[in-house]
Amino acid sequence: MSDIHTPRPGSIKERADIGADARRINADHSAVAPGEIAVGVVIGRASEYFDFFVFAIASVLVFPSVFFPFADKLTGTLYAFSVFALAFVARPIGTALSMAIQRRYGREVKLTVALFLLGVSTAGIAFLPTYAQMGSTAIVLLSLLRVGQGLALGGSWDGLPSLLALNAPADRRGWYAMLGQLGAPVGFMIAAGVFWYLLSDLSSADFLSWGWRYPFYVAFAINVVALFARLRLISTNEYTHLLEEQELQPTPFGEMTRHQGRNVVIGALAALASYALFHLVTVFPLSWISLYSPREVAGFLVIQIIGVALMAVAVVASGLIADKVGRRTTLGTLAGLIAVFSFFVPMLMNGGESGQNTFILVGFVLLGLSYGQAAGAVTANFPARYRYTGAAYTSDLSWLVGAGFAPLVALALAAKFGMVYVGLYLLSGAVCSLAALSLNRKLDIRD
């Protein structure tokens, strides 16, 4: 597929040289098997989600004390969640910038820049001075690095999930769609496990002094491994041929919104129930337990780790279910179940340890079944020319609208009005999903 813009003299040769250099490294691995692509998808997404959850957990356990000690614990946590949301605002901007980089310099350069920025931004947090050392400058630096994470996550889209879906047999599309989603439970399990170990092994003073920095160092190492694993795939001639054959190439943001804006919005809203539930079983309950419960946070993290293991099983099951009944039907049914689940949020979260544990375990199962098919449930609506960029922007918008501000909004609602309003918040996400899927069906847009 040709570029939209007329290239500068020599730019095509530059792009070809850059791509050729990387592909020569993998000359002995020109054949890319579906299994290799699947491994690349899981490794790539797991590394991104690990970074994501390390910041999320630190926003509850660390940042209120380290960066917002001038505020009470609730207000400090709300401030931390505001910084947390910055990445989701920056993410679509990162996607737009990275697509421009890819059109000019190639896929390998774009992914290298994105993952390097992600690693540097994440590891940079480990070296940040505290508020006690630098005052408000420390908060500004934390916010800038969080924006850097968002820009990098927007730029890390490699097209592997779309490539898997497009090359899947007609009766296995649900199975291939869920593979990329496995990165979420893997990433959370590792991040929660690292924090559980630190909380169990260190005193509170040591943890807040230096221990919390360790997961951010680990994140940089994981990103290096993920970078080479993904570059090994995308720099092969076979991978490039498959992407070009399926027309999985970037398109400019303006053209995308003019011609496919409706599909982006419908695709984002169709998955809103999943993304709203995402943070209501991961970040929000951790903050609520930390603030208002006598339970030990380390013990609660163990329950969440068990829950996310169930989520991984549910993600796999979603692929089997979707291949039998269809991805949109699966997503619609789960949105309905999440709506029902929302009415039990107050009873469970206010029901002591047994109620809270039930909320976590059931919530993670519903999340896995729904989130397993949330990506790309309606992105097949996009014509081939727009699918690569459309899938990226649909994901960005889903995260921004459904998940970016969820911990902040849920904690503020629960603290001021009670847990009933958290249930209503989740219900609103489920209703939006059902409405978008209904509109998608009425418009006769086929999967």
Image: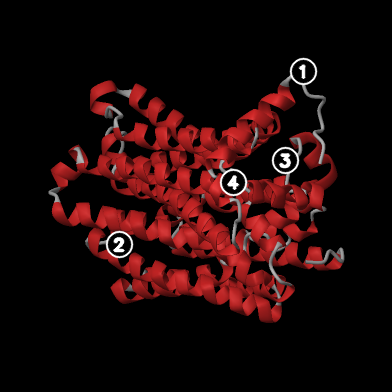
Q: Compared to 373, does 108 lie above or below? A: above
Question: Residue 21 falls in which quadrant of the image?
Answer: top right
Above-or-below relation of 10 to 370: above
Q: Please name which of the two marks, 1 or 3, marks the residue nearer to the observer.
A: 1
Q: Position of residue 392 (x, y in %)?
A: 65, 47
First reached walking from the N terminus: tag 1 or tag 2: 1
Residue located 52% across and 73% down the image:
316
Give the CA separation, mark 1 to mark 2: 56 Å
Earlier along the polypeptide chain: callout 4 or callout 2? 4
Secondary structure at numbered mark 1: loop
Earlier-in-chain disc, 1 versus 4? 1
Write down the residue under mark 1. 9
At label 3, counting other C-alpha atoms closer than 10 Å, the crowd grade (few under 14, some 14-19, many 20 or more) is many
Disc 1, disc 3: CB below 8 Å? Answer: no
Image coordinates of residue 230 in percent, x first then y, are: 52, 47
Amino acid type, residue under disc 3 in the picture: Pro
| Residue 234 - label | 4
Asked if one can make out residue 343 in the rendered structure from this viewpoint, the answer is no
Q: Amino acid at mark 1?
A: Pro
Quadrant of the drawing holding the N terminus? top right
> Residue 312 — which label?
none
**Residue, disc 2:** 301
User: The C terminus appears in which quarter of the rendering?
Assistant: bottom right
The residue drawn where x is 25% and y is 59% is 297
- Disc on the earlier residue, 1 or 3: 1
**Residue at the location (54% across, 52% down)?**
403
Q: Quadrant of residue 439?
A: bottom right
